[in-house]
Image (cartoon, rainbow, N blue to C red):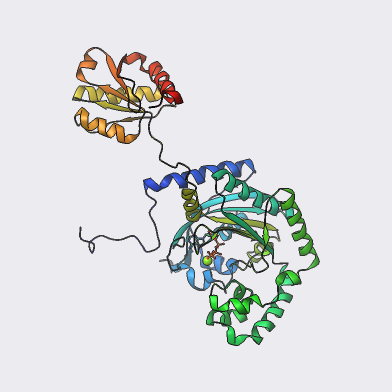
């Protein structure tokens, strides 16, 4: 194999192979069911939007807009960007499709996101998010419901090593007051700031609190706390949220330094973290973004949402030890000889009509029975259905349990639709297992 000749995948963009798909499908199935149960509707938006949307929504001084976006000019001269997150597109769609108009929207969406970051375990350039957005709700009750939904999701998936962090960023106005205090503090400590933080001091000093540079931790931990500068309404909102979480039995930690990487948040922010994934410890993050919709040209509408990192949750899921093996077929159908193969294909289609709940895999290509038995075994099927010339002559098929001691039996072709479910039910009895 000539490595130079093979076109490799783009760095940080992964294939999900069949052996890995079970966790993805389980997460997709469970979230789909939970969202429906909580009254959220699915919506799908484009992977590409005008660059201006993300600049305006996420903010110029964020990591994403400063250095992580995949931006290109198309042949018509438009500056377009592969979406780095889901909220901006969903909000844009709600505005441009006229969905707002005082409505209350409970929406979810999912799919790939693109950020030009340094690839490492749990951090990729194409990654996937499941996003939930609740638009038109002002009170802390929806904040609490979103958090309860995520807590239920972890329980349903059997994920236990997670912790909830919450904080309030206050209103845009109270943040402005706090921001000035922060700038004053950081100016006094300019010598301790790294280059990124110096740059943010002008544009977005709150983001300095989010710095991942260990050398910055001392100066960051001495900074004034946003929680001490909350306006009265935000304080009340946050206190009710805390009381609601306690009422629902959801444990949380108030983290006054949780500011989140995106500009558009106000009041409630939260993040689920885990100690099971190493450095990339955030699996689900969200918050209230009451100011975003007017900023994108819509009527002022309160909203809150969160995004889950699918790769990270799937990795956690694989650590729970729950069996995620791809589903084996119930029956593996073998045939030898041209006539028997033809008969087998027709027979299997009839059985699929008659027994929609039974999965049948048919041996494709020829091969002697020994090779076919090997494939049958590998498929994980419970039962083999064998059609040879001798059986065909007599209008019967042989049935042989593959994972039990029970011997081979014969069954007239026209009785298979009755016998197969009966045998499968029998084989499923735990005390019949080998
Ligand atoms: P981080 O601090 O890890 O960079 P973030 O604040 O940039 O996270 P968000 O924009 O809030 O993350 O995205 C929500 C979730 O998406 C994160 O909690 C994480 O699980 C996941 N996520 C974000 N960036 C990546 C990435 N590059 N690769 C894989 N998952 C990611
Ligand atoms: Mg990031």
Q: Which quadrant does the N terminus fall into?
A: bottom left
Vertical order, 19 against 88 (above or below): above
- Residue 5, compared with residue 249, is above or below; it is below
**Could you say where residue 273 lies in the image, as x and y percent from the top left?**
57, 59
Quarter of image, res 341 = top left
Q: Quadrant of residue 216?
A: bottom right
Tell me the residue at 20%/60% (across/down). Answer: 2
Percent across and percent down for residue 339 are 20, 22
Q: Nearer the viewer, residue 219 or 333?
A: 219
Q: Nearer the viewer, residue 299 or 375?
A: 375
Q: Is residue 79 above or below residue 309?
A: below
Q: Is residue 292 visible?
A: yes
Depicted 194 relative to depicted 284: above or below: below
Q: Nearer the viewer, residue 396 or 70?
A: 396
Is residue 429 in sight in this rendering?
Answer: no
Q: Is residue 103 left or right of residue 66?
A: right
Residue 100, given in percent of the width and then of the height, sits at 67, 54
């Amino acid at each position: 194999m000539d490595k130079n000749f093979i076109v490799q995948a783009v760095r940080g963009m992964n294939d999900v192979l069949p052996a890995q798909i079970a966790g993805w499908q389980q997460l997709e199935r469970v979230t789909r069911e939970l969202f429906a149960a909580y009254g959220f509707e699915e919506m799908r938006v484009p992977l590409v939007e005008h660059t201006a949307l993300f600049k305006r929504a996420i903010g110029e001084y964020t990591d994403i807009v400063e250095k992580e976006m995949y931006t290109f000019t198309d042949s018509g001269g438009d500056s377009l960007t592969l979406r780095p997150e889901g909220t901006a597109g969903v909000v844009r769609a709600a505005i441009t499709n006229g969905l707002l108009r005082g409505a209350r929207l409970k929406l979810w969406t999912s799919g790939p996101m693109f950020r030009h970051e340094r690839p490492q375990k749990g951090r990729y350039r194409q990654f996937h998010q499941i996003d939930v957005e609740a638009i038109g709700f002002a009170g802390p009750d929806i904040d609490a419901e979103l958090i309860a939904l995520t807590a239920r999701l972890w329980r349903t998936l059997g994920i236990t090593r997670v912790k909830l962090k919450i904080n309030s960023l206050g209103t845009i106005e109270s943040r402005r007051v706090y921001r000035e205090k922060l700038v004053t503090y950081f100016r006094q400590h300019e010598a301790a700031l790294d280059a990124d933080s110096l740059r943010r001091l002008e544009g977005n000093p709150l983001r300095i609190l989010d710095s991942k540079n260990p050398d910055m931790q001392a100066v960051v931990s001495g900074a004034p706390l946003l929680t001490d500068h909350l306006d009265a309404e935000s304080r009340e909102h946050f206190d009710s949220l805390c009381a609601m979480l306690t009422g629902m039995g959801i444990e949380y930690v108030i983290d006054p330094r949780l500011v989140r990487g995106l500009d558009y948040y106000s009041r409630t922010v939260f993040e689920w973290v885990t100690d099971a994934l190493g450095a990339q410890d955030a699996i689900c993050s969200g918050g209230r973004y009451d100011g975003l919709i007017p900023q994108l040209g819509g009527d002022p509408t309160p909203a809150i949402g969160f995004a889950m990192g699918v790769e990270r949750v799937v990795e956690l899921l694989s650590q729970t030890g729950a069996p995620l093996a791809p589903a084996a077929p119930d029956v593996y159908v073998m045939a030898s000889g041209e006539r028997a193969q033809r008969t087998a294909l027709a027979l299997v289609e009839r059985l699929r009509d008659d027994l929609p709940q039974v999965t049948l895999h048919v041996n494709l290509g020829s091969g002697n029975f020994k090779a076919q038995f090997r494939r049958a075994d590998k498929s994980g099927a419970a039962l083999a259905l064998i059609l040879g010339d001798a059986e065909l002559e007599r209008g019967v098929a042989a049935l042989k349990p593959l994972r039990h001691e029970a011997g081979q039996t014969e069954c007239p072709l026209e009785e298979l639709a009755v016998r197969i479910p009966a045998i499968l039910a029998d084989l499923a009895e735990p005390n019949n297992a080998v």
